[in-house]
Image (cartoon, helix red, strand yellow):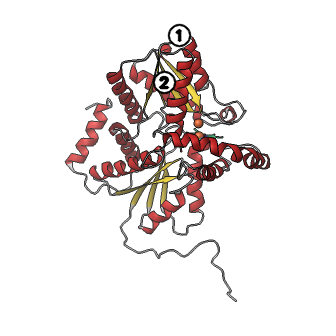
Amino acid sequence: MALFTLGAFAPEPPFVHGQVPRTAVLYCNLGTPDSASTADVRKFLREFLSDPRVVEIPRVLWMLILHGIILRFRPAKSAAKYASIWTAEGSPLKVWTEKQAKLLQGWLSQRGHAVQVRYAMRYGSQSIASQLDALKAEGVTRVLVVTAYPQYSATTTASVFDAVYQWAAKVRNLPELRFVNRYHDHGHYIQALAVQIQRYWKANGRPDQLVMSFHGVPERTLTLGDPYHCECLKTARLLAQALGLGKDQFKVTFQSRLGRAKWLEPYTEPSLIALGKAGVKRVDVVCPGFTSDCLETLEEINMEGREAFLHAGGQEFHYIPCLNDDTAWITALCEISQEHMAGWPTLTRPDAAALAAQRQAAIALGATQ
Ligand SMILES: C=CC1=C(C)c2cc3[nH]c(cc4nc(cc5[nH]c(cc1n2)c(C)c5CCC(=O)O)C(CCC(=O)O)=C4C)c(C)c3C=C
Ligand SMILES: [Fe+2]
Ligand SMILES: [Fe+2]
């Protein structure tokens, strides 16, 4: 009989003295079903909605509601919605997230940083633990965790961090870890949104009202101290400023409510209906909190929201796409990552071209020359 047990820690490759430190960026998004089938959507929803960060009601009661009602009826309904936005390459959320990570890798390398970029999903395939395992196996000793969520919420950002901590709790020789909590007011992020909207308006004309629709959360989270609501409002204010919009030219709303509890208000769809009924002719909707187009933007806004507005008497509905693979957005991701890697010796080629690119980006944002 063995006298000693190794406890929870699995054997890991031995530490090699003199090993070159290696840095990685782990870019994390929410996740999405593997296919638009009801079975895959149910599997995804089960994992997502079982996270106590996402639904904060007493466990036993919630498990009864989740398994007794929601997982019986919602998967088929959601699967039909997913089917309406699915692409040949898969779920838009996955396609964009993967592309953003590849582009970020390219930009960081071009700026002379020796950094590996991987993307991971909080729920479903490409899990955070699997990607951290892969990075560790590749010899990475420093990881910067960046999320696809500009506004911090315990329901999203903190849940990603939980998954990292849960992985870390089982690892003996941990990499150095850093986290980006938020970038809702980062100059490059706001600039990327403004550029995207202005480009859209240049090609399609301007609306009577710009609706900035953010994903909702239960209102209770605000009174419990979640900064999400305030951060959404700050993003909206900065974006309106960058676009030169007056108070009566834009509106902030919250979408995707689930269940009967009160969520952050005003709700997007009733607001669109009210605008249509009030005789507003053209509405443009942008979703600044979503960095990739996904079910919530492509179906809920561009299909359901459009229908609601036009049905209520509105004449023109425009959906402005998310940041997706836009160059200004990838630049923003690059800047945000660089700032948080300060002090980590990642620059292998601090050459004139890389430094000039950084200086130009800063000047474009109003830095003194
Ligand atoms: C209690 C439920 C939910 C909370 C709280 C919530 C917060 C939240 N979600 C996002 C971003 C996304 N959510 C997406 C889909 C989605 N969200 C919920 C529920 C809550 N979200 C559900 C049940 C679903 C699945 C679809 C459905 O059945 O309606 C997505 C899109 C995923 C995709 O595959 O395309 C995103 C992105 C944020 C930012 C947020 C809080 C700030
Ligand atoms: Fe959501
Ligand atoms: Fe939705």
Residue 3 in which image quadrant:
bottom right
- Whole-percent x and y of residue 130? 51, 62
Tell me the amino acid under the disc marked 2. Answer: Arg
Image location (x, y in percent) of residue 213: 53, 28
Residue 66 visible within the image? yes
Residue 279's disc number: 1
- Residue occupying image coordinates x 53% and y 10%: 279
55, above or below 228, in the image: below
User: As drawn, is 369 to the left or to the right of 283?
Assistant: left
Q: Which residue is mark 2?
A: 237
Query: Callout 1 environment at 10 Å: few (<14), some (14 to 19), or many (20+)?
Result: few
Q: Nearer the viewer, residue 16 or 118?
A: 118
Residue for point 33% across, 31% down: 365
Q: Position of residue 107 (x, y in %)?
A: 31, 48
Q: Is residue 192 shown left or right of residue 67? A: left
User: Considering depth in this image, is 346 or 331 the residue closer to the camera?
Assistant: 331
- Above-or-below relation of 182 to 90: above
